[in-house]
Amino acid sequence: MVEKKSHLPTHIAFIMDGNRRWARAKGKPGAWGHRQGVRRIQDVLDMALGVGIPYLTFFAFSTENWHRTQEEVSSLLSLFRETLRDVLQEQNKKGIRIRIIGEIDKFPEDIQKLCTEVKETTHGNNTLQVQIALNYGGRAEILHAVRSLFKEIKKGAFLPEEISEEMFSRISSPLVF
């Protein structure tokens, strides 16, 4: 692993938002903006490798993105396919480990398989740890935690008044693929 400089952060997260608005402001289609955003990821990865930042997270597709037009969702899914294939080839050579976090089972089967392949292929890498959040969202995580707590209450594991912040925090941790 690259030696980290003490004055730099250990983990940087990016919410990939605004690419569509940026493209439209330039008179381009939203898909063009998404593609430009993905191209910038390579620059960020190279920068992190160069200065020794060990962890990056990219929030790339929230649960709310499913409500966009079918055309835009299809375009984003195609971009994921292309990007995940590139990740396998390029980032694995650089020793980058990639994890996919979020509810992957909502994606088409071929994308789920690509996510598994990326995770398994890069598992032993250690120059940079990258998380890609797909199908994530605060509301989805709260619902996941509430449903998990409800199941435990229903089984008699505890009473509703025994729920604490610590318990909720433990149950509502991000879904990891």
Image (cartoon, helix red, strand yellow):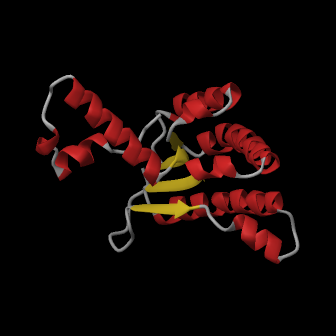
Whether residue 62 is visible? no
The residue lying toward the viewer, choosing from 144 and 50, is 144
Q: Residue at x 58, y 58 (%)?
A: 45
The residue lying toward the viewer, choosing from 157 and 23, is 157
Whether residue 138 is visible? yes
Q: Decide if residue 90 is on the left or right side of residue 57.
A: right
Q: Residue at x 49, y 47 (%)?
A: 131
Q: Residue at x 12, y 44 (%)?
A: 161
Residue 106: percent from the left, percent from the top? 59, 33
- Above or below, 8 against 127 in this view is below
The residue lying toward the viewer, choosing from 70 and 120, is 70
Q: Decide if residue 59 is on the left or right side of residue 171.
A: right
Residue 156: percent from the left, percent from the top? 15, 25
- Above or below, 121 against 46 in this view is above
Residue 140: percent from the left, percent from the top? 46, 45
Residue 159: percent from the left, percent from the top? 13, 36
Please count the marks in the image. Answer: 0
Residue 152 in which image quadrant: top left
- Above or below, 24 against 104 in this view is below
Q: Residue at x 20, y 22 (%)?
A: 155
User: What residue occupies the far top of the structure in this picture?
Assistant: 155
User: What residue occupies the far right of the structure in this picture?
Assistant: 27
